[in-house]
């Protein structure tokens, strides 16, 4: 599982440019004998028929990672950029990045003013992306254009997968190549199993910029239940429990609510959450709960179809969200793998058909 995760984290896939990871997910599903297709947006939709075709469950993970995008290039060969997804500017200075052109990847570094050149009043000045640039070793605008680098070129953090400490993994794009890995591993485990209900396994695009791809998938699949496999910020020394309750090493997270001040978010199905808890306890798997000020693909999916979609979560906690190096505990991912499989096997047509708000 970790070998696959390493492979997937190395692929570039910023929002809107998920081509490499989408192709890998498509190929991976085909290798497992799954009926699969890709839509115009780049969403990958796998179908595993159940004993009955009356009810449908959707297992979703987004393929995109946070990134940057070239905004302008200068005559002396430097690159200014904007964010593609939510990233704190504090984590950007001196980060290695990859410029994703059609022909190849180019390595660069995010430059900032050297401490040796700063005036006293600049030392504690907040970091702004406007004051940062990318250096790929070019000396002119013409050099960059010859590389295929121009305004609109996507940028990702440089691959840096590493197993660290006692059972931890560090990498860029843990969010959400963990989810992509779990999708493929779930399909692998189901190779000789027939579920009671139809299963749609979907690798969706553009979650980091508003859960756009998953909405299109849901309009096509029209599932009864949907379970979202993603990551969630975990506690670190900067985060008190009032900000986040998820912790590394305590198992996957079942979320009750996520919401932004704009009111974009999801109130998750209590029925699915209770089933997740029952399955986890039956399988002696750890789990934890949270609510968080964010959104996931559920925010758009749960509103689709003539009756809406009941939404649930299996989230893997990780630290240093949306940074060049996120950290997760392998045991949390393993528990999520076992939980997803046991949950899917527990479902019946009656479960999905009987979901009623008054139950």
Image (cartoon, grey):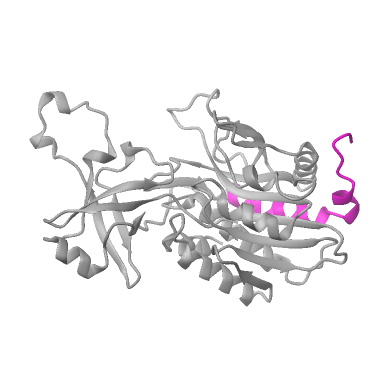
Please state the horizontal and vertical placement of residue 207, each as a whole percent of the image.
53, 50
Task: Note whether residue 233 is visible.
Answer: yes
Q: Nearer the viewer, residue 359 or 72?
A: 72
Name the residue: 54% across, 39% down: 248
Left or right, residue 326 beside residue 252? left
Please state the horizontal and vertical placement of residue 352, each as a whole percent of the image.
85, 50
Image quadrant holding the N terminus, namely bottom right
Please state the horizontal and vertical placement of residue 140, each as a whole percent of the image.
12, 61
Please state the horizontal and vertical placement of residue 226, each as a whole percent of the image.
72, 50
Q: Is residue 99 above or below residue 37?
A: above
Q: Quick check: is 24 in the magenta stretch? A: no
Main SS of the magenta part reads: helix
Q: Nearer the viewer, residue 330 or 244?
A: 244
Image quadrant holding the C terminus, namely top right
Left or right, residue 359 beside residue 69? right
Q: Is residue 144 above or below residue 210?
A: below
- How many marks can you see? 0
Q: Quick check: is 354 in the magenta stretch? A: yes
Name the residue: 47% across, 66% down: 19
Left or right, residue 140 beside residue 69? left
Q: Quadrant of residue 246?
A: top right
Q: Quadrant of residue 103?
A: bottom left
Look at the image and give the residue range highlighted in magenta: 332-359
Q: Nearer the viewer, residue 206 or 236?
A: 206
Task: Note whether residue 335 is visible.
Answer: no
Q: Is residue 225 above or below residue 359?
A: below
Name the residue: 86% across, 44% down: 355
């Amino acid at each position: 599982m970790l070998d696959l995760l390493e492979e997937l984290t190395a692929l570039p896939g910023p929002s809107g440019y998920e081509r490499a990871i989408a192709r890998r997910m498509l190929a991976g599903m085909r290798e497992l004998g799954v009926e699969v297709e890709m839509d115009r947006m780049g969403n990958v939709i796998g179908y595993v028929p159940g004993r009955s075709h009356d009810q449908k469950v959707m297992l979703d993970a987004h393929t995109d990672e946070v990134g940057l995008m070239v905004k302008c290039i200068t005559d002396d060969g430097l690159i200014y950029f904007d964010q593609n997804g939510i990233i704190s500017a504090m984590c950007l200075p001196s980060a290695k990045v990859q410029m994703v052109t059609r022909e190849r990847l180019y390595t660069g570094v995010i430059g900032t003013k050297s401490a040796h050149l700063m005036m006293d009043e600049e030392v504690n000045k907040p970091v702004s992306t406007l004051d940062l640039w990318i250096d790929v070793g070019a000396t002119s605008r013409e050099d960059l254009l010859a590389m295929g680098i121009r305004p609109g070129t996507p940028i990702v953090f440089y691959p840096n997968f590493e197993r660290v400490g006692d059972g931890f993994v560090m990498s860029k794009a843990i969010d959400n190549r963990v989810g992509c890995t779990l999708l493929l591993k779930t399909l692998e485990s189901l190779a000789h199993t027939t579920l009671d209900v139809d299963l749609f396994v979907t690798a969706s695009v553009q979650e980091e910029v508003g859960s756009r791809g998953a909405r299109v998938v849901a309009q096509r699949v029209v599932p009864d239940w949907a379970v979202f496999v993603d990551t969630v910020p975990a506690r670190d020394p900067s985060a008190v429990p009032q900000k986040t309750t998820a912790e590394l090493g305590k198992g996957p997270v079942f979320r009750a609510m996520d919401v932004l001040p704009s009111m974009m978010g999801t109130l998750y199905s209590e029925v699915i959450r209770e089933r997740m808890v029952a399955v986890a306890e039956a399988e002696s798997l750890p789990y934890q709960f949270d609510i968080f000020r964010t959104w996931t693909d559920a925010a758009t999916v749960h509103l689709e179809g003539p009756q809406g979609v009941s939404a649930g979560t299996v989230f893997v906690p990780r630290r240093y969200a949306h940074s060049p190096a996120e950290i997760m505990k392998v045991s949390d991912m393993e528990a999520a793998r076992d939980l997803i499989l046991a949950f899917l096997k527990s479902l019946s047509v009656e479960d999905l058909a009987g979901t009623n708000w008054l139950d």
